[in-house]
Image (tube, rainbow, N blue to C red):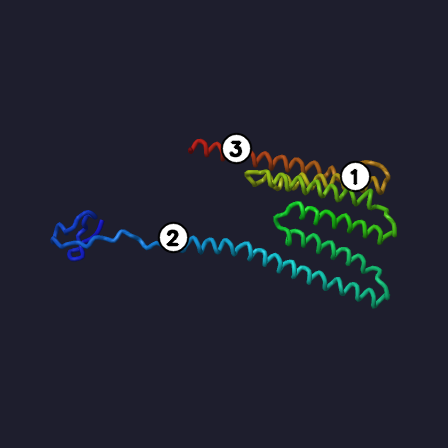
């Protein structure tokens, strides 16, 4: 619908003259300005800039992290040399700071490469506890019996959490459930390793107090998650 410019009466779009005052109406230009040719180009440029901006932010975070960790590293070494003349106790903060640097750097430098991140998180842990054991005793003492199984349990738990998260189509309460299951595995193996190392016997002391409520809570969360998801799917089917 259009309006007569003289009397203001509403006129149908196909009318040439106003039915009230017989004024000739100007035909409307139906062609709209074409902004489509430029807009997609701008969107495409923005989409191309986003990965570069994210990469710059990650590199900046990596640079800041490196500087922040280097400062206490230098302070520890310098203080140890001034006081004792040789590097002794500063080996502990050196190893800890290097471990933190490797574990932070892997996801910053390789955010989408899960295999590299896993290696970057797992190998430094193995080397760290190996170095700490050697620093403590000069030889391997608790590394094989305690550190290796615990690190392996952390790796298994991390795999369970990551696998469950990636494979889940509907993410919700199932994610904290997987975390609880992973934490239960870690506690169980830590308890077995420490008990066997301290008492020289296989057994469980405290992990059952964590394992039972964690597994029950995780199972309840999974039940709620899949129950709610099932109801949502049912509602969608009924609505469609």
Name the residue carrying label 1.
192
Q: Nearer the viewer's eye, disc 2 or disc 1?
A: 2
Residue sitting at x 84%, y 46%: 142
- Residue 221, horizontal then vertical, whole percent: 60, 37
Residue sitting at x 71%, y 54%: 102
- Residue 210, horizontal then vertical, whole percent: 71, 40
Q: Is residue 122 above or below residue 60?
A: above
Name the residue carrying label 3.
230
Q: Earlier in the sequence, mark 2 or mark 3?
A: 2
* Mark 2 touches mark 3? (CB < 8 Å): no
Q: Nearer the viewer's eye, disc 2 or disc 3?
A: 2
Along the viewing direction, whichever of 19 and 173 lies nearer the viewer? 19
Q: CA distance from mark 3 to mark 1?
A: 39 Å
Q: Residues within 10 Å of mark 2 (few under 14, many from 20)?
A: few
Q: Residues within 10 Å of mark 1 (few under 14, many from 20)?
A: many
Image quadrant assignment for residue 195: top right
Name the residue carrying label 2.
36
Describe the element under mark 3 as helix, strand or loop.
helix
Left or right: 195 in relation to 9: right
Q: Earlier in the sequence, mark 2 or mark 1?
A: 2
Q: CA distance from mark 2 to mark 3?
A: 42 Å
The residue lying furthest to the bottom in this view is 82
Left or right: 109 in relation to 1: right
- Residue 78, horizontal then vertical, whole percent: 79, 66
Q: Is residue 23 above or below residue 214?
A: below
Describe the element under mark 2 as helix, strand or loop.
loop
């Amino acid at each position: 619908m259009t309006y007569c410019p003289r009397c203001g009466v509403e006129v149908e779009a196909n009318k040439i003259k106003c039915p009230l005052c017989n004024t000739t109406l100007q035909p409307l230009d139906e062609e709209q300005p074409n902004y489509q040719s430029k807009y997609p180009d701008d969107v495409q440029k923005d989409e191309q800039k986003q990965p570069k901006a994210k990469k710059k932010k990650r590199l900046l975070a990596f640079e800041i992290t490196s500087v922040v960790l280097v400062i206490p590293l230098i302070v520890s070494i310098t203080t140890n040399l001034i006081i004792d003349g040789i590097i002794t106790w500063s080996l502990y903060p050196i190893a800890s700071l290097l471990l933190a640097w490797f574990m932070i750097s892997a996801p910053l430098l390789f955010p989408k490469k899960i295999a590299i991140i896993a290696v970057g998180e797992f190998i430094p842990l193995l080397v760290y506890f190996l170095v700490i054991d050697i620093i403590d005793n000069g030889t391997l003492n608790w590394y094989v019996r305690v550190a290796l199984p615990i690190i392996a349990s952390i790796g298994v738990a991390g795999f369970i959490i990551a696998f469950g998260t990636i494979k889940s189509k509907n993410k919700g309460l199932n994610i904290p459930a997987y975390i609880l299951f992973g934490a239960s595995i870690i506690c169980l193996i830590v308890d077995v390793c420490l008990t066997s190392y301290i008492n020289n016997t296989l057994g469980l002391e405290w992990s059952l107090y964590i394992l039972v409520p964690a597994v029950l809570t995780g199972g309840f969360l999974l039940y709620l998650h899949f129950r709610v998801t099932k109801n949502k799917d049912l509602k969608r089917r009924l609505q469609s």
